[in-house]
Image (tube, rainbow, N blue to C red):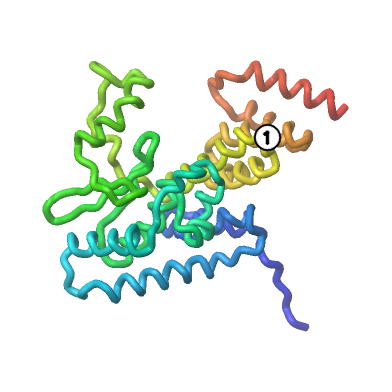
């Protein structure tokens, strides 16, 4: 009798990808986010499409090209020849975060463009990393003569003055000025793959919260809870999204879990009140 195996659900597949930090496949995990919007998506096809771009890029570069030449060649290929760039017409379109759509339209947001660019950069031996800069994801490349920080929307290199100017509103908004100012370098540290993926998901979370699209918001929060098992605020937010979607029992379970494990939580009274309303609805 032949053995039969059930295919994993999209969330189970995602969970298997993000289980370990030692071998975290950022491109594959990021591509898999689109399963919620495109259930028939073939993630391996997305990876194959990127592999084809990588093969085209490698054919353009001499095998002994120095790092600066490789960087210039990559930027010419990615931004000018392929035409990747920001979606200025609809910046908050969720498709800007789905890599299959970004590959098709050549339009995205800084973090989705950065993930594709990084895959190509690392494939040609560049020492490149993503940077969770406040308000705008960045790229950095270490070259023999120094570090280049780039805007993923355009490939533009940014000077220290450019970065300070972009950082200024964030610093003022959060009181990080004068005696509380911290060095620019702290904002330019390499972002781990898990943090990059969390930032992608939180972009989608913000979009679907604004749109009050509760089913899609729940799906995003399911992934955030898997990705960040210690982040109780995501459990709380999933519970609140379940409540809005009419999933009362699931909402109660999440909010009870949040209150049970949360320490020194500031919104405890509000969550207790919301729980009481939900429990009355189920009694």
Residue 2 rendering spot, x and y as whole percentages:
74, 82
* Residue, far left: 145
Above or below — where is 129 with respect to 125?
above
| Residue at horizontal 72 percent and vertical 78 percent from the top | 3
Q: Is residue 92 visible?
A: yes
* Residue, far bottom: 1
Q: Is residue 222 left or right of residue 275?
A: left
Q: Which residue is tagged 1?
A: 241
Residue 189 rendering spot, x and y as whole percentages:
29, 42
Q: Quadrant of the N terminus?
A: bottom right
| Residue at horizontal 42 percent and vertical 48 percent from the top | 86
- The answer to which of 104 and 37 lies nearer the viewer is 104
| Residue at horizontal 50 percent and vertical 49 percent from the top | 96
Please, what secondary structure does the residue beneath circle 1 have? helix
| Residue at horizontal 40 percent and vertical 46 percent from the top | 110
Q: Is residue 91 left or right of residue 70?
A: right
The quadrant in which residue 65 appears is bottom left
Q: Is residue 17 visible?
A: no
Residue 55 rendering spot, x and y as whole percentages:
36, 74
* Residue, far front: 89
Q: Residues within 10 Å of mark 1 (few under 14, many from 20)?
A: many
Q: Quadrant of the C terminus?
A: top right
Above or below — where is 70 with respect to 60?
above
- The answer to which of 130 and 91 lies nearer the viewer is 91
């Amino acid at each position: 009798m032949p053995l039969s195996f059930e295919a994993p659900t999209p969330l189970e597949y995602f969970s298997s990808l993000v289980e370990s930090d030692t071998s975290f496949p950022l491109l594959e995990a990021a591509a898999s986010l689109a399963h919620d919007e495109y259930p028939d998506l073939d993630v391996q096809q997305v990876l194959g499409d990127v592999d084809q771009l990588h093969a085209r890029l490698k054919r353009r570069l001499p095998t002994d090209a120095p790092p600066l030449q490789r960087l210039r060649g990559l930027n010419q290929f990615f931004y000018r020849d392929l035409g990747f760039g920001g979606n200025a017409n609809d910046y908050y379109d969720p498709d800007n975060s789905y890599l299959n759509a970004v590959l098709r339209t050549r339009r995205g947001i800084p973090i989705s463009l950065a993930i594709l660019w990084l895959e190509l950069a690392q494939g040609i031996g560049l020492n490149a990393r993503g940077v969770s800069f406040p308000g705008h994801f960045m790229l950095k490349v270490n070259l023999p003569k120094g570090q280049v920080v780039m805007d993923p929307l355009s490939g533009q290199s940014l000077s220290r003055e450019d970065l300070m100017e972009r950082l200024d509103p964030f610093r003022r908004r959060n009181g990080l000025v004068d005696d509380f100012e911290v060095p620019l370098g702290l904002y330019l540290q390499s972002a781990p793959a898990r943090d990059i993926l969390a930032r992608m998901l939180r972009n989608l979370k913000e979009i679907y919260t604004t749109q009050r699209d509760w089913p899609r918001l729940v799906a995003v929060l399911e992934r955030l809870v898997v990705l960040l098992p210690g982040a109780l605020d995501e459990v709380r937010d999933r519970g609140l999204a379940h409540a809005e979607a009419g999933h009362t029992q699931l909402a109660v379970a999440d909010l009870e879990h949040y209150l049970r494990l949360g320490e020194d939580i500031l919104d405890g009274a509000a969550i207790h009140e919301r729980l009481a309303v939900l429990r009355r609805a189920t009694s």
